[in-house]
Amino acid sequence: MKQDWKDFWNERYSKEEFAYGEQPNSFLKERLDKLKIGTILFPAEGEGRNAVYAAKLGWIVSAFDLSIEGQKKAMLLAEKNNVNIDYKVGELNTMDFQPNQFDAIGLIYAHFPAKIKSLYHKTLDSYLKKGGVIIFESFSKKHVDYVTKNEKVGGPRDVATLFSIEEIKADFSNYEFERLEEIEIELKEGLYHNGIGSVIRFVGRKK
């Protein structure tokens, strides 16, 4: 992945304030609260708000991100909340996760470059146990129109890195979808997710 991508996230996460706040994503929280506690992975976890919340519930948490600054903030947040998370820095292909390792995966605004996003999804799927659950919320392809009108809502402007329902169905064809929708929501997450946006949400159970 390009160095400027790493530099972007290191710059964003180097501030004292948390870029997307310290509270978990509301959709993740809603769904995670209903699941049996086990092992969970958070790819592209940034400053750790979702990972720390899961750990507070009792989950055994693994996470990774490109940004070492994100890792630093995540570990501070974990310490503040008296929990432990296993947080690695690097790309997915450098991780040592094992097949069938996790009971759940939280993909929350995990926007990977277009050339690798489907490969990443397939790789992550291999780490999930049969019967395991993916919780997903990310910007849809329609979101380009929203961020153009209001940059404060955040999110990529490159439509190829955004998601469609068709892409999700293709990448996770071996899942039973408990929920799959494209909806308009209002975001209030820290400094960089504020306003109306268009997202894809899904909860899928691996067959």
Image: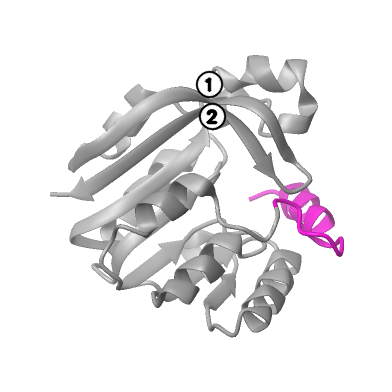
- How many marks are shown on the rendered structure? 2
Q: Say which residue label 1 marks.
A: 141
Quarter assignment of residue 162: top right
Q: Which of 146 and 207 is in front in this view?
A: 146
Q: What residue type is labelled 1?
A: Lys
Quarter assignment of residue 72: bottom right
Work out whether residue 194 can be spotted.
yes
Q: Give the range drawn in magenta.
A: 1-20
**Vertical relation: 20 (above or below) 46:** above
In the picture provided, is 107 more to the left or to the right than 122? Answer: right
Q: Does the magenta stretch include residue 3?
A: yes
Q: Is mark 1 on a helix, strand or loop?
A: loop
Res 34 label: none
Q: Which of 202 and 66 is in front in this view?
A: 202
- Residue at horizontal 46 percent and vertical 23 percent from the top: 183
Work out whether residue 95 can be spotted.
no
**Vertical relation: 12 (above or below) 55:** above
Dot 2, crowdedness within 10 Å: few (<14), some or many (≥20)?
Answer: many
